[in-house]
Image: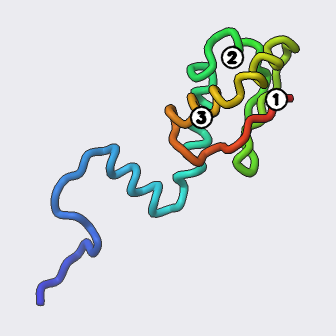
Amino acid sequence: MSYNPYPGRKKEATPLEEAFNELLKAYRLEDKFKEKQLIGSWGEIVGRTISDRTSSVFIKDKKLFVKLSSGPIKKELMLNRSKVLLLIEEKVGKGVVEELICL
């Protein structure tokens, strides 16, 4: 029987993205990473007009809370809630947020 100084280590090289995803899985950080990715790309998802009038974005219990400084933008976002949730699913994946709440 031969001695393996690196147990559990793969012999072949893997792409960085695959290795990073395995690391997130191993430490159970996938959901937190996706949440941070969503918050970081909020402006890209909704566009500059809404992004400029957004004062804060945070996620708690799979609910996305968005604090807006403009009443009409808030109303528009509430009316298009399902479309925004679909855009979020396309960007970061399904199951990250289930509800959008505008404050």
CA–CA distance in space, label 2 to label 1: 13 Å
Q: Secondary structure at mark 3?
A: helix
Q: Residue at x 64, y 27 (%)?
A: 84
Q: Amino acid at mark 3?
A: Leu
Q: Which residue is mark 3?
A: 38
The 10 Å Cα crowd at callout 1, few under 14, some 14 to 19, many 20 or more, is some
In the picture provided, is 75 more to the left or to the right than 16? right
Q: Residue at x 33, y 52 (%)?
A: 19
Looking at the figure, which quarter contains the C terminus? top right
In the picture provided, is 10 more to the left or to the right than 56? left
Total marks shown come to: 3
| The image quarter in which residue 17 lies | top left
Mark 1 / mark 3, whichever is N-terminal: 3
Q: Which residue is mark 1?
A: 102
Residue 51 image label: 2
Mark 2 / mark 1, whichever is N-terminal: 2
Seen from the viewer's position, the closer of residues 28 and 92 is 92
In the picture provided, is 5 more to the left or to the right than 102? left
Foreground mark, 2 or 1? Answer: 1
Q: Residue at x 51, y 32 (%)?
A: 91
- Residue 53, given in percent of the width and then of the height, sits at 77, 14
| The image quarter in which residue 44 lies | top right
Mark 2 / mark 3, whichever is N-terminal: 3
Q: Residue at x 54, y 44 (%)?
A: 94
CA–CA distance in space, label 1 to label 3: 16 Å
Q: Amino acid at mark 1?
A: Cys
Relative to 49, residue 44 above or below: below
Q: Secondary structure at mark 2?
A: helix
Foreground mark, 1 or 3? Answer: 1
Q: Amino acid at mark 2?
A: Ser
